[in-house]
Structure formats: C-alpha cells, structure tokens
Amino acid sequence: MYKILQAEMLTDVTALMVVEAPRVAKYCNPGQFVIVKLDEKGERIPLTICDYDREAGTVTIVFQAVGASTKKMLELHSGDAFQDFVGPLGCASELIDKPIEELKRMKILFVAGGVGAAPVYPQVKWMKEHGVDVDVIVGARTKELVILEDQMREVAGNLIITTDDGSYGRSGMVTKVIEDLYAEGRKYDICVCIGPVIMMKFTCLLTKKLGLPTIVSMNPIMVDGTGMCGACRLTVGDQIKFACVDGPEFDGHLVNFDEAMKRQQMYKTQEGRAMLKLAEGDTHHGGCGHCGE
C-alpha cells in the first residue's frame, strides 16, 4: 500500500496528493508518469508526475475528476492509501539530457493549459534548480481553475497567467499571449506545451507559423499506460507511436492531432473499438481485453 501523506483540493474538481513511494521517487524525472490503482477493483489510471522528493521518498500527483475512479479518488484523505502506485513510466523530458550550458543559452517557453500546469511544473522546477531561466504561460478558462500559481511563480523566470474569460491575469487563450510576446519582440528557441489536446493543437499551428519548435505531451490520451490497450496510438510524422511507451512527449509539429482526437472519441465505445481493430489490423495493440482478444 502507498500511503497518502497530503491531500488537498486545488479546485472543485482537481486534487493534489503527496504519496509515499520511495522507489518511484528515487528514479523518476520530469516528463514521466505513474499508474495508480485505488483498490482491488479499481481501474488503472495513468497520471503525470507533478513533483518528487528523492530524500523524503514522495511523489506528488495532481488529477481532475473526469470519471468514476477519479471521482472516488477525491474522497481520499491524508492517511489513506493506494493499493498500487507504479512507475516511473514513459520517457523523461528530452531537455534534461541537454548540456546545462546549452540550456542556459536557449530561450525556452513553457505553456500550460488547465491541469497541464501539473506536468509542466516539474520541468520548470528542474530548470530552476540547474540555473536555467525560462518563461511560463499558464492558462485556464477562469480564475477558479488556475492551479499551482504560487509554486510556479517560485521557479519560473517570468510567469504569465491568462484566463479565457479575463477574470484573472491577462485576457485570452495561451495562443494570444504567445502572439503578444512575439509582437513585443520576444523570440524563443523551443516551446514545451502541455494541456488539453485541442489547446496543444492550436498552439502548434501557431508555433509552426512562427518557426518555433514545439514539444507536446500526449498524456491526456493515455488509458492503460503500458502499451497494451492501444488507446494512445497516434501518428507522428509518418510513424505510428504510442504515447505511453514512446512518449508521452513528441514533436508537436509532427503530431496528427485531428486523428488522435477522433480516435480518442471512438475508443470510448465498444463499436468504436471494434472499428479501430478492423482498420488497424496487426498494429492495433488490442491486448486490453476490450476488443474480443
């Protein structure tokens, strides 16, 4: 069992939990994720790592209640425990493998949408710890949905908050802020964008026009987290990839977002999964048990 040491609500539907998991904390890096399982009957839920403390042996997760299992997770308190807490899984951010002096010379922009602030935070924190100043845009629909602002402000060189309705910070979507920054004369060498798939799509359409290389995290489309179910299959350039085992981070200018979103909707129904299995043949990865295999 993996004890919950801290549990707090960030919004009405978003929770932060600090979990005692020494072996996971020892090896995890920014960009990776864990799979949590509430109890014997609970489903496996992949969640990106929001923070970790190797000395304390803890891992912090942030999640939004979108289904039965995550809604049940909201009922957990400090002192409760998860039955399973597996990780780290997936590939770490490619930026942490670059020489530090090279990173210090780069102009890096992080863009977080909604709960995407959670996986962006450990990357920005890692940059701060290694003396790399970065700009960060955090966007949300309303003021009430902005999360991790204080934590992000401590590690970002320059933090910009924006809300779609203008209720806090700047007014408008993250793409408008990027356009404004470029209009002000700011230029970047690379952008890391994490958030809802539709937000990453439109951010990449803009950054492609700007000639700004962009990394995205396709963690929102993951279901099983081990490559068995095939739910997170996507096309990157001319290659078939799976977000959980090949990513979750990819070159955003090569990701076929429209295909990924359509596939995500089809996967939710039995008929849709059957159609995907028929269309994808041997490459389907239908080992989840939902496709009649």
Image (cartoon, rainbow, N blue to C red):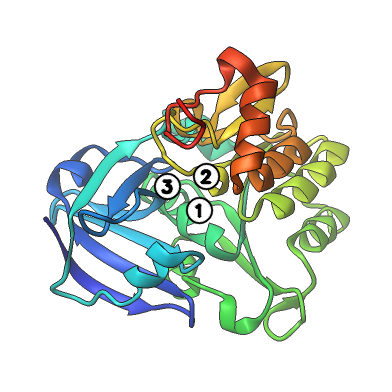
Amino acid, disc 1? Val
Residue occupying image coordinates x 11% and y 55%: 1
User: Quadrant of the image for the C terminus?
Assistant: top left
Residue occupying image coordinates x 42% and y 52%: 128
Amino acid, disc 3? Gly
SS at circle 3: loop
Residue occupying image coordinates x 47% and y 36%: 93
Question: Compared with residue 47, is residue 10 higher up or lower down, i.e. above or below?
Answer: below
Q: Which residue is mark 1?
A: 120
SS at circle 2: helix
- Distance from Cα at disc 2 to Cα at disc 1: 12 Å
Give the quadrant of residue 253.
top right
Question: Compared with residue 234, is residue 18 higher up or lower down, i.e. above or below?
Answer: below
Q: Which residue is mark 3?
A: 131
- Residue 257 drawn at (x, y percent): 74, 39
Q: Going from the N terminus, do you reach mark 2 or mark 1 first?
A: 1
Q: Going from the N terminus, do you reach mark 3 or mark 2 first?
A: 3
Q: Are marks 3 and 2 in contact (CB under 8 Å)?
A: no
Residue occupying image coordinates x 48% and y 80%: 11
Asked whether 249 or 258 is in front, the reply is: 258
Number of the front mark, 1 or 3: 1
Q: Which residue is mark 2?
A: 219
Q: Is residue 55 left or right of residue 32?
A: left
Q: Going from the N terminus, do you reach mark 1 or mark 3 first?
A: 1
